[in-house]
Image (cartoon, rainbow, N blue to C red):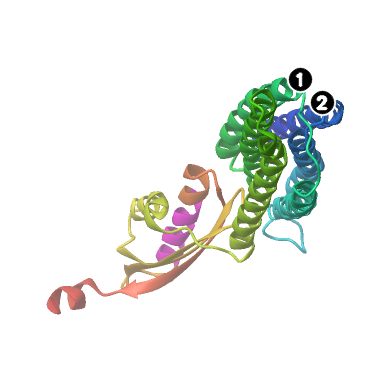
Amino acid sequence: MTDAKEHRQAQAGAWASVLVNLVLTVGKGAIGILAGSRALVADAIHSAADLAGSVAVIVGLMVARKPPDRDHPYGHGKAELISSFIVAGLLAAAGLDVAAGAVGALFRPAEQPRASAAWAAAVAVVIKEVMFQYNYRLGRRLRSRSLMASAMDHRSDVFSSLAALVGILMARAGAAWGMPWMLHMDAVASLVVALLILKMGYEVATDAVHVLMDRVVEGEAIKPYESVILSVPGVEHIDELRVRDHGRYVVIDAKISVDAHMSVAEGHGIAAEVKERLITRQPRVLDVLVHVNPCYPDEEEGGR
């Protein structure tokens, strides 16, 4: 798949999130106010934060697509992390606002939410789960951090809408059963929604920080790169291999050993082949730096 096609698919996913979040923000907010459901209004605030985050994702994707230049030789892929931080910040702000409103509502007289609030929350659960699956699979295929962050937003909305739905149903049940204390379950549900929003914001920010700090790929994830290097004729073994995660792509620093008796030109040729194979066979690889060390096979065998 070409980079242009991947970019178009990523943009399509981001714009779909914008449209869905816009509809859900307006719909849940209006129904929540008219139906008297604090939990549904809190869920609408969550969707509003997602809407702003989806716009940030689109901007991040546009900047990340810019090719490497003199000041940014490794490209602009980390621009997507800015989108992730914006999403995390909006989630944190929304979570704190909802939590403050929920706590205050617990100390005021509660009213029974209307049935329309429950229906709106149920529809939101279905829509958001569909959007999560779409963005998550697209983000994994395109290796897009911002799309993955957007997918996590959709998943958090699934849980928040579920919490709102449970709270609304319990409040209505309390009114029907003559149990006034259960009317406060709508406010309790909005507090649960706030905690879910804050948790998701923390997870999005933490993941972005790891990439920003040049987290290295480890464990099973590094084996495909090792296999490509060892497939190059003349590579005796790998002395050191670091695969730095830059979001949509990785940058590799490799130290390999070659026969100490071959010429400099031959060693350089092997290093060039290692770089070419890594870039052509591993689509995430943006650049490779190969350092060549001398290997003395006779001395190694004698020392065994």
Q: Point out which mark residue 279 bears.
A: none
Image quadrant for the C terminus?
bottom left
> What residue do we see at 15% from left, 73% from top?
301
Please, is residue 257 above or below residue 234 in the view? below
The Cα atoms of the two marked residues, 2 and 1, are separated by: 7 Å
Q: Residue beneath label 1, please?
A: 116
Label 1 CA crowd tier, 10 Å (few <14, some 14–19, many 20+)? some
Give the x, y percent position of residue 164. 68, 34
Frontmost residue, 54 versus 103: 103
Residue 194, percent across and down?
70, 48
Residue found at x 45% / y 59%: 269
Residue 75 is left or right of residue 262, and the answer is right
Amino acid found under the numbered disc labelled 2: Ala
Residue 245, image quadrant: bottom right
Q: Position of residue 148 (x, y in %)?
A: 62, 42
Q: Is 212 left or right of 68, judged from the image as shown?
A: left
By secondary structure, the bulk of the magenta-drawn segment is best described as helix
Magenta stretch in the rendered image: 265-276
Residue visible at 80% across and 41% down in the picture: 109
Q: Earlier along the polypeptide chain: callout 2 or callout 1?
A: 2
- Dividing the picture into quadrants, the one containing residue 260 is bottom left
Q: Is residue 245 visible?
A: yes
Q: Amino acid at mark 1?
A: Ser
Residue designated by label 2: 35
